[in-house]
Image (cartoon, rainbow, N blue to C red):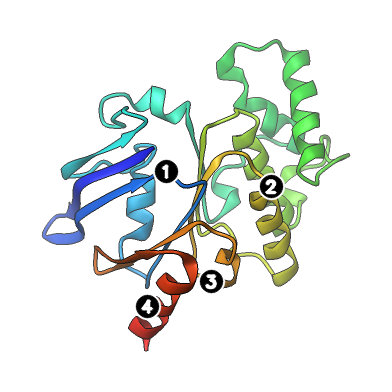
Amino acid sequence: MIEFDGVGHSYGEHTVLDDVRLRLDERRVAFVGANGSGKSTLARMINGLVLPTRGRVLVDGLDPARDGKRVRNRVGFVFTNPDSQIVMPTAGEDVAFSLRRKGIPKAERERRAAEALAEHGLAGYAEHPAQQLSGGQKQLLALCAMLVLEPDVLVCDEPTTLLDLRNKRRFAERLRGLEQQVVLVTHDLELLDDFDRVVVLDEGRVVADDEPDEALRYYRELVV
């Protein structure tokens, strides 16, 4: 359960979010809205990357502002640009690096990393230079590096923005097969047909919250 209780956020005098109240317990939830609507800021509050200036956020009763480490152990985050997450020379090393904080022996980290890569379409790439992967492969690598930690929630902030159509579909298929609760921020509305819930934000406020068909109909009318 992810809860936003009267959440607001401001940068100086500029209000980004205003009195957001949501309870998210569905398996697949999406945030949509125009650029600057506040959707990415809201998503980043789930694991404490951004803290509210008003109200509070709870993840299964834990407040990221007070229990940041415990929340981040439960919430994985995938950014728009995978280069911001890739820190090691090879794909295998990058995934294994995520496991270092768990105190797992090196050989076991390498084994788990290879298994994760294979599970998500990167079998045989453990020794491949990470920066020489394609854009789609890099995004899958970023996904692997989060999922190998077995989070309960995966937040993805516009993860398909830099991908071509084929890799967008490939990434969407990987998300569709996950057991984790997924919170997706996106402009790619075609990805949301099988989602349970879509939240539409406009100028920092929730203006629609429904099943995909109804919520996206409202959003399209709002854009027009």
Q: Amino acid at mark 3?
A: Leu
Q: Is residue 178 above or below residue 189?
A: above
Foreground mark, 4 or 3, reads: 4
Of the two numbered discs 4 and 3 on the same chain, state the one appearing first in sequence: 3
Binning the other alpha carbons within 10 Å of mark 4 as few (below 14), some (14 to 19) or many (20 upward) gives some
Q: Amino acid at mark 1?
A: Asp
* 2 and 4 marks in contact (CB < 8 Å): no
Outermost residue to the right: 124
- Quarter of the view holding residue 33: bottom left
Of the two numbered discs 1 and 4 on the same chain, state the one appearing first in sequence: 1
Q: Classify residue 57 as left or right of residue 197.
A: left
Residue ID for mark 4: 218
Q: Using the numbered discs, state the Cα–Cα distance from disc 1 to disc 2 in whole angstroms.
A: 18 Å
Q: Using the numbered discs, state the Cα–Cα distance from disc 3 to disc 2 in whole angstroms.
A: 18 Å
* Rendering coords of residue 83 (x, y %): 59, 49
Residue ID for mark 3: 189
Residue ID for mark 1: 25
Label drawn at residue 36: none
**x 16%, y 43%: residue:** 55
Q: Secondary structure at mark 4?
A: helix
**x 66%, y 58%: residue:** 172
Residue ID for mark 2: 177
Quadrant of the drawing holding the C terminus: bottom left
